[in-house]
Image: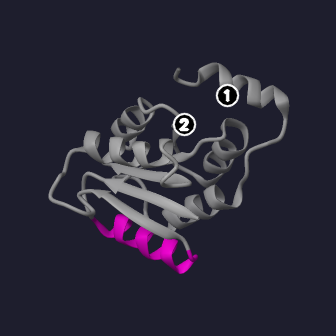
């Protein structure tokens, strides 16, 4: 899978996420402070969102101090459904019921161990085939 990873800060969590994704065999493109000196959460989230929205990445992961800013910014990109997840169950539910394609994480409150649990749940879940959920997702899509 091709995964776009962006953050406004490079730290132990972002380094661990890169390592975990590559160990699991995924292609990783880096954005924001992970590939340049640009430490803007808006730019990192937009770059990841645009990669996902344009089909250059299958899904994305965005990080900032709270995770809120990047989730808001990524959701402004057509075709992106970003979900701020602080635990594995929320991540799995976001993938299954909301077909979320961008995972937002807090750099402040996500330990490496918790990040791995969330990542495994995110990658292990798949969107439901239930037409009721597809209709709700369609209802919130940016046009």
Q: Is residue 13 magenta?
A: yes
At numbered mark 2, what does the secondary structure look like: helix, strand or loop? loop
Rendered residue at 53%/40% (across/down): 83
Say which residue label 2 marks: 81
Give the residue at x 56% y 54%: 58
Q: Magenta: predominant secondary structure element?
A: helix
Q: Which mark is residue 137?
A: 1
Query: x, y (%) of residue 86?
Result: 51, 48
Quarter of the rendering containing residue 9: bottom left
* Range of residues picked out in magenta: 11-25
> Mark 1: which secondary structure?
helix
Q: Residues within 10 Å of mark 1 (few under 14, many from 20)?
A: some
Q: Are marks 1 and 2 in contact (CB under 8 Å)?
A: yes
Rendered image quadrant of residue 4: bottom left
Foreground of the two, 111 or 73: 73
Q: Which residue lies at the image location 19% right of the left edge and 61% below the top edge?
A: 36
């Amino acid at each position: 899978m091709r995964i776009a990873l962006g953050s406004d800060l490079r730290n132990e969590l972002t380094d661990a996420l890169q390592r975990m994704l590559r160990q699991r065999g995924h292609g990783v493109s880096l954005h924001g402070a992970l590939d340049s000196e640009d430490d803007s959460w808006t730019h990192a989230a937009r770059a990841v969102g645009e990669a996902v929205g344009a089909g250059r990445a299958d899904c994305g992961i965005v990080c900032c101090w709270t995770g809120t800013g990047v989730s808001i910014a990524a959701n402004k990109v057509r075709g992106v459904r970003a979900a701020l997840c602080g635990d594995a169950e929320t991540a799995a539910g976001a993938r299954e019921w909301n077909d979320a394609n961008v995972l937002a994480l807090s750099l402040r409150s996500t330990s490496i161990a918790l990040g791995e649990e969330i990542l495994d749940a995110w990658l292990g879940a798949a969107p439901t085939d239930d037409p009721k959920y597809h209709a709700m997702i369609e209802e919130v899509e940016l046009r």
